[in-house]
Image: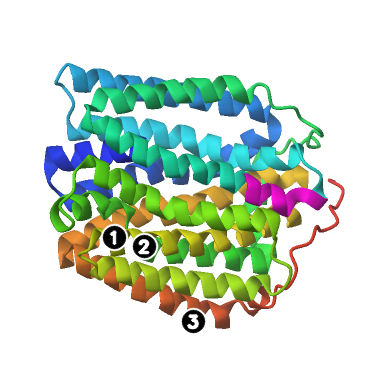
Amino acid sequence: MLSVAVGWQMYALTGSALALGLVGLAQFLPSFALLLVVGHVADRYDRRRIVRTCQLIEALAIVTLATLTVIGEVTAPMIYVLVVVIGATRAFEFPTLQALLPSVVPDRLLPQAVAASSTAGQLGVVLGPAVGGFLYAAGPLAAYGVCATLYVVASVLIGGVAIVRKPPPVETDVTRSVFAGLAYIRSKRELLGAISLDMFAVLLGGATALLPIYAHDILHTGPWGLGLLRSAPAVGALTVAVWLARHPLRRHAGRKMFVAVAIFGAATIVFGLSTSFALSMLALIVLGASDMVSVVVRQSLFQLGTPDHMRGRVSAVNAMFIGASNQLGEFESGVTAAWWGTVASVVVGGVGTIAIVLLFVRLFPELYRVDRLTPATEPKPR
């Protein structure tokens, strides 16, 4: 909901593709700057309390944005400042939530739990943009108000999560601790390959920052159309997540990840060239479905192969890679659209994604050979 409201409002204020891209950059910079800190915090302190605090700060930032809108004082620089605040809180919230999941389910159920968790998240991503688009049509205050309220509700509910097992204490040497996540991922070639492949694919192929332009200038719809376009990838992702929760990947997981990312690139090309709302929706649904296969493989490799006392720090690095693909990808889309035009930017990004798949098959054969997603024996912390 927030993405739809901020994207439409920013484009209404500026009419600039570059301004939309800068929203993504404003979200990414805090996660990059805080990379080495957030993982240490997630492993050292109560993860539920961290998430609750972050969600309350996000709600406060959205209330501020709503207030500025109502009094007619909202400007593009003010939106960027508040997006930076939200990006900083998400830098702590996202890896902490990832590290929290294995504390509430046994290892043998983790692949299904990842898929089920993704299903719940994608359900929100399906409903949020669609509802947000219709609410924004009634006025930005309606979208921002509901969004802020839901953040407060989420903050309350996270306190009811029961911890089955607590992570062991982290080492007291902060310098060694904060760099441990980077070192661990570098030592696991298949994990490094999965995270890097996903990052470069979405960095090049992601077109979400340009959806306001497609909705307004190419497909000629209003905020409701933007909401549906933002929801379409999640419809595909939700469908695949529900399927994988019941039918987890049994064999050739690495190979299927590469195929899925290639389909992601092809769907991006189709969306970029489309001038039909129905075809654009279909392309985005396929795009989201293929991306979910990649997400489940990557998340399963990360969750199953990472010792619990390391999950916060490894999650922080993983979150930075995801942030680079999503938010930095939005910035890249905005810049290239300003240079080459919107359609050319999206099509070139889809072609680049397919090229990355071919390159990574050679660079990371360990990932291509990954067969089964099974729990690894967790070493004891030293």
How are the colours assigned in the image? rainbow
Q: Nearer the viewer, residue 71 or 108?
A: 108
Question: Which three-letter amino acid code belongs to the residue tagged 3?
Answer: Leu
Going by the image, does 216 lie left or right of 154?
A: left
- The magenta-colored residue range is 108-116
Determine the secondary structure under disc 1.
helix
Q: Judging from the image, what secondary structure is the residue with disc 3 in?
A: helix
Could you say which disc has been placed on residue 358 in the image? 3
The answer to the question of whether label 1 and label 2 lie on touching residues, with beta carbons closer than 8 A, is yes
Circle 3 packing at 10 Å, graded few (<14), some (14-19), many (20+), is: few
Q: Earlier in the sequence, mark 3 or mark 2?
A: 2
Q: Is residue 126 visible?
A: yes
Q: Position of residue 256 (x, y in %)?
A: 60, 73
By secondary structure, the bulk of the magenta-drawn segment is best described as: helix
Query: What is the number of the mark on residue 278?
Result: 1
CA distance for labels 1 and 2: 6 Å
Please state which amino acid type lies under the numbered disc 2.
Answer: Leu
What residue is at 29 percent from the left and 38 percent from the top? 133
Q: Is residue 142 left or right of residue 201?
A: left
Residue 168, compared with residue 195, is above or below; it is above
Residue 163 vs residue 233: left or right? right
Please tell me which residue lies in front, 18 or 208. 208
